[in-house]
Image (cartoon, rainbow, N blue to C red):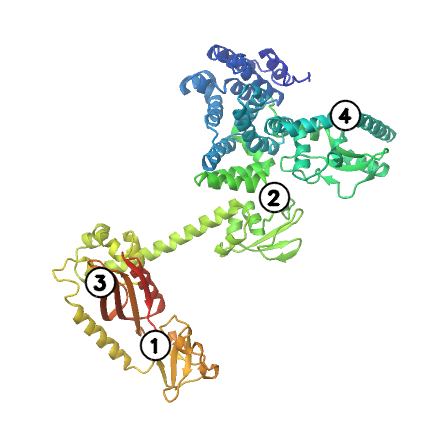
Amino acid sequence: MDTIKGAHDQVSYEDVLMLAKQYITNKDDLDLMRSAYDFIMIKHATQKRRSGEPYTVHLIWVAYILATLQTGPKTIAAGFLHDVMEDCNVPHDEMVERFGEEITTLVEGVTKINKMPYMEESEIYAENHRKIYIAMAKDIRVILIKLADRLHNMRTLQFMPSEKQQRISRETLEVYAPIAHRLGINDIRIELEDLCLSYLDPKAYKEIADLLEQKRSERKEAVDHMRESVEKLLQEHHIEYRIKGRAKHIYSIYKKMVIKHKRFDELYDLNALRIILKNKVECYEVLGIIHEKYRPLPGRFKDYIAMPKPNMYQSLHTAVIGEGGQIFEIQIRTEEMDELAERGVASHWRYKEGSKYSAKEEQREIGEKLQWLSDFITISDEVKDEKAQEYYDTLKRDIFEANVYILTPQGKIVELPNGSTPIDFAYRIHTEVGHHATGAIVNNVMVPIDTKLKTGDVCKILTQNNAHPSEDWLKFVRTGSARNKIKAYLTKKENENNKEIIEEGYRILKAEVTRRNLDEKVYLDSEVYKPFFNTLGVKNFDEILMVIGKKSATPSALLDKVIPQKKSIFDNLSKMLKKNNNAIAHQNKKKSIGISVKNVSGLKMSISKCCSPIPGDQVAGFVSKGQGIKVHRIDCPNIVNADPARLIDVYWDYTNLDNKRYTVDLQILGLDRPNLLNDVVTILGTSNVSILNINASVNDLDADIKVSVSVENAEILQVTIDNLNKIQGISNVKRVIH
């Protein structure tokens, strides 16, 4: 291949064509590229860049960079055309007619990204990023074009105002460089990162560049000597090889010096050699030869051939002490691995003539090879309707910050963020595996599901069809994707349960409407109940049905409220109180109070009137003198400091309660207003409680309502208290302890 032109060179259409012809020979494909070029030369003819040069120079450079990646003719054509719809107002239909649907879709994908303004506000900023990532998830070629576009823009950023230089550099470093890294396109990533640093921290950039220059001759001498020594060694073993140096990546040096607080002379990889071989077996053979000759540094060996990086990068890395005492980093890889290391995904899926191209099939193949991209597409589909910041945070945590590699029992590598658990792993395998997970075996040992996984762990997930996600999982899962799937399942389950309760409430209400011979069209219509929502402490008709379905309120009391009545709610209050008191008096004649003592029967027992315990309350028995056992709530002040010897364990005998009702005194405090008491009586009347007595007083503007009710259990009482607290003006509702 001819030498690739550098950033400061000039390129022409002929340069693009020369590169493209090395792998594209089909006349129709070449004509398509020419047609795209001719089109932009007409449409962008009068447009200039800030540098003063024709705008078309930028478009040709984008196409040229894409040709260096050996992308297909349609991708190169889209590179030429990527600004024509936005800058020249070329309509969609004209693009389709001239260049087809596929190229038009690519151009529109890039245009959508270009249109997004960069803003510092986190949510808007995150929204912009989300659009970029979703565009990439739809078609990898969109982001390849955008990377080429951004690279040339960064090369010519000196013509922009300082503020814009900073903004574009930050965005490039945060968004585009990580994508290039994840796609394995190191040439572009390295250049983008170094260019960004030169604008974001020019002082540090210059200092590192100067240090590299100062040490250049010394380093060259050492590297040349080491290179000769390695070459001699490989020739002795009759191994075919190619050795090349490595470009010094200023941004990577900057990160190590600034973030890891390393001194310049502590950086091992400044002296580096790369050995290129024919096959994988030779890589390991040469590694052994190198280690036999030169002393390796402990902990510096990494085998990325056996366990490739998520961007498919493969190589052996080692650090050794050379003959002069300097430390050298040596990379050993095959020609194919080297090409993949430089050009990443673009190298693996470079355009091949003679094969039928399918964008969808290409995207599928990439997803199979790049596990992270497959996960990324899944996340983009699942979270795209969520808040942009949540999507962006999920992506950063699950994809861009992922650095733990877990193996399935079959040897498949799954990439996860630090701190991930077997549940995160299960959901990354498949949603259904996560939903039905019951346990995990890591490295042949059963472990808790909240265990933090480490790189190299072999994890097997145990499942059962009847197992389901637990809300407790949300306390320890690390990945956003697992969290979202758990939340979605729990929400769906809750909605299903609520639906069943609502349906039951509707059935109960309908039965009562039928029993009263009321018009179903009227009294099963939510509109009839709307005026009473505030009074009842609900937001909609479904909430009314929920309360009825849970048996926290009776349909009879609800209908009594809704059916038009001439009389005031207080007209029949005295009759109702008399009826309710007679009912509770009749019940109190029964001997059983619903309380038992374990393994003891026949004891004289009674409910204490001071704290009035009811089923659901935690209770204790107090042995009184001459009055048997008095049952108190355990928080009753009258027994808190009692002699422990006089306390006895008691429990509610739920099998023998038989709908028994218990008396409870409530105090309701609030701000006095018209109809306050009416609203209180209404809520009590629509709840599954019976009013035994009610008394109200007003001091200045403070209302004090004391009410005695009979109720079956603490759950119903709590629902009643919650509903009372929703009444406008009510400040506190509490049980009275006498």
Q: Residue at x 78, y 26 (%)?
A: 242
**What amino acid is found at the position of numbered circle 1 in the picture?**
Cys
Q: Residues within 10 Å of mark 3 (few under 14, many from 20)?
A: some
Nearer the observer, 419 or 497 = 419
Where residue 199 sits in the image (x, y, percent)? Answer: 59, 26
Q: Quadrant of residue 617?
A: bottom left
Q: Residues within 10 Å of mark 4 (few under 14, many from 20)?
A: few
Q: CA distance from mark 1 to mark 4?
A: 91 Å
Residue at the disc numbered 2 = 414
Q: CA distance from mark 1 to mark 3?
A: 26 Å
Q: Residues within 10 Å of mark 2 (few under 14, many from 20)?
A: some
Q: In the rendered view, would you say 180 is above or below 674?
A: above
Residue 610's label in the rendered image is 1
**What amino acid is found at the position of numbered circle 3 in the picture?**
Leu
Residue at the disc numbered 4 = 216
- Dots 3 and 2: beta carbons under 8 Å? no
Q: CA distance from mark 2 to mark 1?
A: 63 Å
Given this view, does label 3 or label 2 mark the residue nearer the observer?
3
> Which one is earlier in the sequence, the residue at label 4 or at label 2?
4
Q: Secondary structure at mark 2?
A: strand
